[in-house]
Image (cartoon, helix red, strand yellow):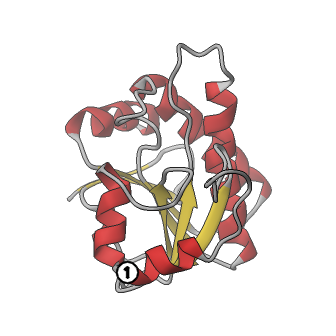
């Protein structure tokens, strides 16, 4: 795995690899509102964690229709079969050109995930690149929002001792590398 420790805050690390293999207390899942698993990181986490994650997701209350986690919000389950104790499921926005509050919703997804981690006393957390896959959020803008949101949170709270941005693809890794170097 490629690794970089951020100059802005030594608690932030950048990795390229598989988020389901990390040794942290919580990983964040870029989930769908229904929390039923899917493609990308969502599918990988559900496959690695097994049926227990889906069972726990299905026990969460429904907000409306079949939405268990509205866009920008976060919920938490165990890690199922993974060694990670918690999975924080958050729903990032689908990019619609930026006029539908997508940047605010993405910031909320990161912030609410951090708040869930804090509530559980988590000291280490790993984030994927939320909304930059099939949801088509511009990768540079998403990375800026992610880094700014995490840095702001770490300035006001010292619960988290390690925040990892885990990129699966080279393009996202290079974008984060430039931001954190």
Percent of width and height locating residue 29 = 46, 59
Q: Is residue 164 above or below residue 131?
A: below
> Which residue has dot 1 on it?
51
Q: Is residue 140 above or below residue 74?
A: above
Percent of width and height locating residue 15 = 31, 54
Q: Name the residue: 39% across, 37% down.
A: 176
Percent of width and height locating residue 12 = 50, 55
Q: Name the residue: 20% across, 59% down.
A: 1
- Tell which of 130 and 153 is nearer to you: 130
Which corner quadrant of the image does residue 58 belong to? bottom right
- Tell which of 14 and 142 is nearer to you: 142
Which corner quadrant of the image does residue 44 belong to? bottom left
Left/right placement of residue 86 relative to residue 44 reads right
Q: Residue furthest front?
A: 65
Left/right placement of residue 66 relative to residue 120 reads left
Mark 1 element type: helix
Q: Name the residue: 45% across, 39% down.
A: 180
Left/right placement of residue 50 relative to residue 158 reads left
């Amino acid at each position: 795995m490629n690794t970089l420790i951020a100059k802005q805050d030594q608690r932030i690390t950048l990795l390229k690899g598989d988020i389901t293999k990390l040794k942290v207390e919580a990983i964040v899942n870029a989930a769908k509102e229904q929390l039923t698993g899917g493609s990308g990181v969502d599918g990988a986490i559900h496959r690695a964690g097994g049926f227990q994650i889906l069972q726990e997701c299905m026990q969460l209350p429904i907000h409306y229709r079949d939405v268990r986690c509205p866009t920008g919000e976060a919920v938490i389950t165990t890690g199922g079969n993974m060694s990670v104790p918690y999975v924080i499921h958050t729903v990032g926005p689908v990019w619609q050109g930026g006029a539908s509050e997508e940047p605010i919703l993405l910031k909320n997804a990161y912030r609410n995930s951090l708040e869930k981690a804090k509530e559980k006393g988590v000291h280490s957390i790993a984030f994927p690149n939320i909304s930059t896959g099939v949801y088509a959020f511009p990768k540079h803008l998403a990375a800026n929002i992610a880094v700014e949101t995490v840095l702001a949170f770490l300035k006001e709270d010292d619960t988290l001792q390690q925040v990892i941005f885990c990129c699966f693809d080279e393009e996202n890794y290079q974008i984060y590398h430039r931001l954190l170097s």
